[in-house]
Image (cartoon, rainbow, N blue to C red):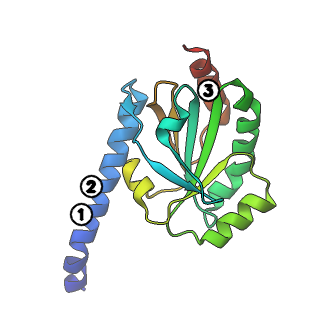
Amino acid sequence: MLGAMLRSLPSLRSSFFSACAVLLFALLSGCGAKQPAPESRFVLLDGSSVQTSDFAGKVLLVNFWATSCTSCVAEMPELVATHNAYADKGFDTLAVAMDYDPPAYVVNFAQTRALPFKVALDNTGANAQAWGDVKLTPTTFIVNKRGEIVKSFVGPPDFAALHRLIEELLAQA
């Protein structure tokens, strides 16, 4: 038993430091500290791609999710409603499926639910890595018009508070 614990120590240490990094990022983003959104290339379900910079001048919600995540599936109708409420006002949504999510499941989910926003496959995990080594789903980032991450949520957000934040960011120049 002790041998098994010692062998798992590097893995535990890595997980611990990853969790600390996510917590630190969450604390900083809650304190008004803004950091530029990572310049990432996202491969969409139709095979086309978009980059973070393509959303310049818009308020962007980036949601890391998986079809196997019950919280992700449960929050999806709220994400759709949020997207539909603000899409014509300079807001966009990008749902990024995690690398362990089978692409066929993601395509089926997006099609059967007629998701109105861009859905990307993070087949290599590079996007999740670039956005703070995302491991927990759902994880959502709000990016302002200047391309700065202003808020992040691990777990489903409080949608009333999220809508207030989106409205505030949309009103900014």
Tell me if I can see residue 64 in this picture.
Answer: yes
Label 2 – label 1 distance at C-alpha: 6 Å
Q: Position of residue 88 (x, y in %)?
A: 74, 28
For label 1, the residue is 13
For label 3, the residue is 166
Q: Residues within 10 Å of mark 1 (few under 14, many from 20)?
A: few
Q: Is residue 22 above or below residue 46?
A: above
Label 3 – label 1 distance at C-alpha: 36 Å
The residue lying at 66 percent from left, 59 percent from top is 46
Amino acid of disc 2? Phe
* Disc on the earlier residue, 2 or 3: 2
**CB under 8 Å between discs 2 and 1:** yes
Tell me if I can see residue 154 in this picture.
Answer: no
Question: Given this view, does label 2 or label 3 mark the residue nearer the observer?
Answer: 3
Q: Position of residue 113 (x, y in %)?
A: 79, 56
Work out whether residue 86 or residue 140 is closer to the camera in this orientation and state it: 86
Left or right position of 107 against 69: right
State the mark number for residue 17: 2
Work out whether residue 154 or residue 52 is closer to the camera in this orientation and state it: 52
